[in-house]
Amino acid sequence: MSDPTSGPPVVLLPGLLETHHMWETMIDRLRWSPDRMAVFDLPGHMPGDDAETIAQDLETGGWVDRLAEQIRDRFGGVPALVIGHSTGGMMALWLAQRYPELIDSLVLIGALTKGDRGRTFDPGARFFSVPMLGEMAFRAGMTMWLSSPEKFQQGYALAAADRKLEVPAPEAMRAQLSACDPSALYATAMWVLNADVGAGLAQVGCPVLAIIGSRDPIVPPAHQIGIIRGAPQGVAQMMPAGHLPFAECPDLVVAALRGWQLRQARG
């Protein structure tokens, strides 16, 4: 990592209701070379994304197939280090199961393998799943959250331990999410709630690092540890944070990523 032109190329995947802008601070601190890096948004998170198309692409796997094609085209088939946050981590695991030849290693931050996140009952998820009413509530919540920079920061910080962030949410992320179709975002959220990539963990043969916030209020740490137990080459690193370690304790995350790349380079 001391030489940003060495090592595998890097692919970054944000989480649900996040955009690629969330990685800007990490990219700056790690001094990754732009020509050896690619950042992708999740389905539904780009202006113009259509809810019906998104739902179909996720159900059939078309979205992850296109992601694989983009990564292959971008790096000529050279295996990449794929880093995913939350739902982005779920997508990284899905990608690794379907296209192992494109993966050098994985770093999963606050990741989940299943929509229920190991919880026997999630009232919020149940409520948002109610036909019509759930989407109306989702739209209202998104409108309120994105209505001002202050509300956006406050809502984002709810995922942090003690609601404290060292790195604020990028305003550009609020701007992009505001331009998205709420129905497309909702379609992605509903897919996540019903998705399960955990059954394929044993197929993930590449090295996996799980960075886990010990006080994560979104994805229970025990659920994240289950990823490491299921992946043959899994390693966990706990951090004193909630669901947003890269924004709560960025120096620790930078050190973990540097150490991981150095470890993989040494074999």
Image (cartoon, rainbow, N blue to C red):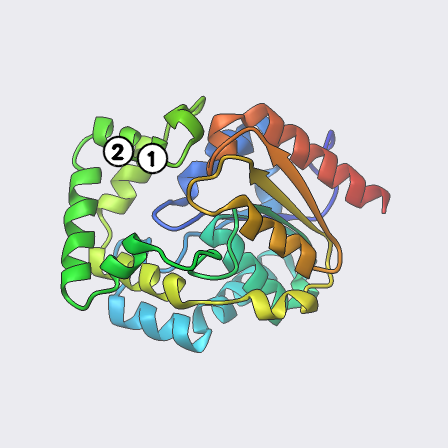
25 or 158: nearer the viewer: 158
Left or right relative to 95: residue 19: left
Task: Look at the numbered disc 2 and give the secondary structure of its residue.
Answer: helix
Q: Residue, x 62% and y 63% (percent of image)?
A: 96
Q: Which mark is residue 156?
A: 1
Q: Which mark is residue 44?
A: none
Q: Residue 78, located in which quarter of the rendered image?
A: bottom right
The crowd level at tag 2 (other Cα within 10 Å; few <14, some 14-19, many 20+) is many
Name the amino acid, label 1.
Answer: Tyr
- What is the x, y in percent for residue 81? 65, 50
55 or 21: nearer the viewer: 55
136 or 54: nearer the viewer: 136
Q: Is residue 195 visible?
A: yes
**Could you tell me which quadrant the N terminus lies in?**
top right
Left or right relative to 169: residue 183: left
Q: Residue, x 52% and y 50% (percent of image)?
A: 111
Q: Is residue 229 above or below residue 64?
A: above
The crowd level at tag 1 (other Cα within 10 Å; few <14, some 14-19, many 20+) is some
Pointer 2 residue: 152
Marks 1 and 2 sit apart, C-alpha to C-alpha, by 6 Å
Q: Is residue 138 above or below residue 65?
A: above
Left or right relative to 72: residue 142: left
Name the amino acid, label 2.
Answer: Phe
Left or right relative to 56: residue 90: right
Q: Is residue 104 visible?
A: no
- Asked if the residue under mark 2 is in contact with the one under mark 1, i.e. CB atoms within 8 Å, the reply is yes
Q: Residue, x 67% and y 44% (percent of image)?
A: 236
- What is the x, y in percent for residue 109? 55, 44
- What is the x, y in percent for residue 162? 40, 25
